[in-house]
Image: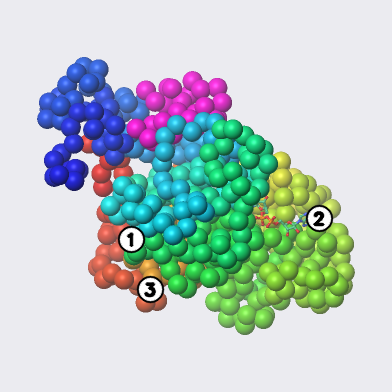
Amino acid sequence: MTTSNGNEPRGVAVLRNPWLNRGSVFTEEERDRLGLRGLLPPRVSTFAQQVERLEGVIASCNTALNKYVILEGVHASDEALYFQLVMKNIEEYMPLIYTPTVGEACQKFSHIFRYARGLYVSSEDRGRVRELVANVPNENVDMIVVTDGQRILGLGDLGVNGMGIPIGKLALYTACAGVNPQRVLPVTIDVGTNNEEFLSDPLYMGLRQKRITGPAYDELIAEFIEAVRERWPNVIVQFEDFHNCHAFDLLDYWRDKICCFNDDIQGTASVCVTGFYTAMRAKKEKLSDQRILFLGAGSAATGIAHLLADAMVEEGLTKQEALARIALFDSKGLVSKNRGDNLADNKIPFAHDFENAKTFLEAVRTVKPTAIVGVSAQPKAFDKEVIEAMTELNDRPIIFALSNPTSKAECTAQEAYIFSQGKCLFACGSPFGPVSYNGKTFVPRQGNNSYVFPGIGLGCIFARAKTIPNGIFLTAAKRLAELVSPSDLDNGSLYPPLSAVRDLSAEIAVAVAQYCFDNGLAQVERPDDLGAAIRATMWKPTEEGACF
Ligand code: NAD
């Protein structure tokens, strides 16, 4: 890397630059060439020793939040080291740099803030967002993750403190799929917060005002999107943790205009549909023959339901036939045409002619589903009677208890396997350990969005996708389901091990890029060997520092 005057940075400027710094790993020759001699302890470490040193520091922390703080310190000072740590320990560190620990980090963001990262755009910046974007040091940006902090995980409105989410998500793009960390940008749009605790907290770092909504909100988002696309015309914008009151509208407005997606809606749907495709492999049935009942009718439920309907249409059903195979149960009971309340728009496509069912068990008896999907955050709603009813109806009932955290799960893995006498095909939204039943050990796996969004991002970056239609999320789901091994299937796992995420992401990226080439969405030439070309772009930290 050179500076704007063409010179290679030297001395402290190298050590203070996380893209260049390699701390004690700098060789004798580099220490002389870069003017580092005397600025580091004299003995040169290997990269592995540096990693081991930090692993020890992290292991010695007594809370997950302290581990997060240490990791973010490394992120801010030495990116190669940070990503080596995360990639080497992906299963252990993913819950630290992302959910659940990142949730606590966001709640306390204004109290633990040490290093600035990313871009903050506030409603006071209306009319000058281009100037802010011009201040971003990254020459090129391929991927932006943006939040307005209004619905951070299940924690509600965290205002500007939500920045921890785009930072964590982009770290996963790099760790899981090799998206170049110098070409990503976390963004928080601060339009105020309705969180009274934050508004009265002297250390809170966001605007001290209630949220703005309406045209002023939409215009700020539009100004931001236009400014980033003006500077980086091919940038992908991923909307993250927006409240339902904006998430669907933003997606509907922008999805055909720019390259963008919403991971809470579309990534969740993709990873859930993966579970269905895998379950179809196990049951040797077609998705279009299933009847699916959701517990919950919010953003996750309707996002998944629409993608399932698309998948059924791909198998030959009409849209009407597909929608008729999917039913929702919300806090007022089974969603039906004759329920007599004003249904929200997102529920209307799934309102059918059902008799009223007030309990979920009654709904199961009415709909006779082959699959139930819990996205309601109602703990224990899939009780013994519900699971037994599903087992009476089906040889292999599909039971997905996707709510998280664990305390909100509709049932545990143990309950699902025991109440169904080991017959169910189970996926979860929270981590559950293996379950032994009748001499067989089941290994339940989490429908974690991290299986799909990094590979989707990498594939779209590679192809320079014009837009990201739903077909891309189905493509990713199909590819991921194919990557579930026969031995995983035998163990009841509907997803591959997350430890393989880097290879899985590469495979998903290839399928996604192929989809872009086949559907006129790509803006680059298709290389002869797509797999090799994509893998060659995957960034990885090395002994020599951050490089491809
Ligand atoms: P949401 O607030 O948009 O929707 C919740 C829905 O649950 C609403 O439709 C509500 O009517 C319904 N509900 C509430 N109480 C109910 C009751 N007693 N009986 C029946 N329905 C009831 O929330 P969301 O974003 O859709 O998320 C829902 C859950 O799914 C959360 O726990 C979230 O963590 C989980 N989730 C998991 C994944 C994943 O595993 N990958 C992804 C997204 C969401």
Earlier along the polypeptide chain: callout 3 or callout 1?
1
Label 1 beta carbon within 8 A of ligand 1: no
Q: Amino acid at mark 3?
A: Leu
The residue that label 1 is drawn on is 232
Earlier along the polypeptide chain: callout 3 or callout 2?
2
Can residue 158 be seen in the rendering of this structure? yes
Residue found 24% across the figure and 20% down from its top: 40
Residue found 56% across the figure and 60% down from its top: 217
| Mark sitting on residue 521 | 3
Percent position (x, y) of residue 145?
46, 53
Task: Please name whichever residue, 324 or 169, is drawn nearer the observer in this view of the structure.
Answer: 169
Percent position (x, y) of residue 136?
34, 49
The residue that label 2 is drawn on is 386
Dot 1 crowding, Cα within 10 Å, few <14, some 14–19, many 20+: some
Dividing the image into four quarters, tell me where ligand 1 lies: bottom right
Earlier along the polypeptide chain: callout 2 or callout 1?
1
Percent position (x, y) of residue 155?
65, 44
Percent position (x, y) of residue 218?
54, 64
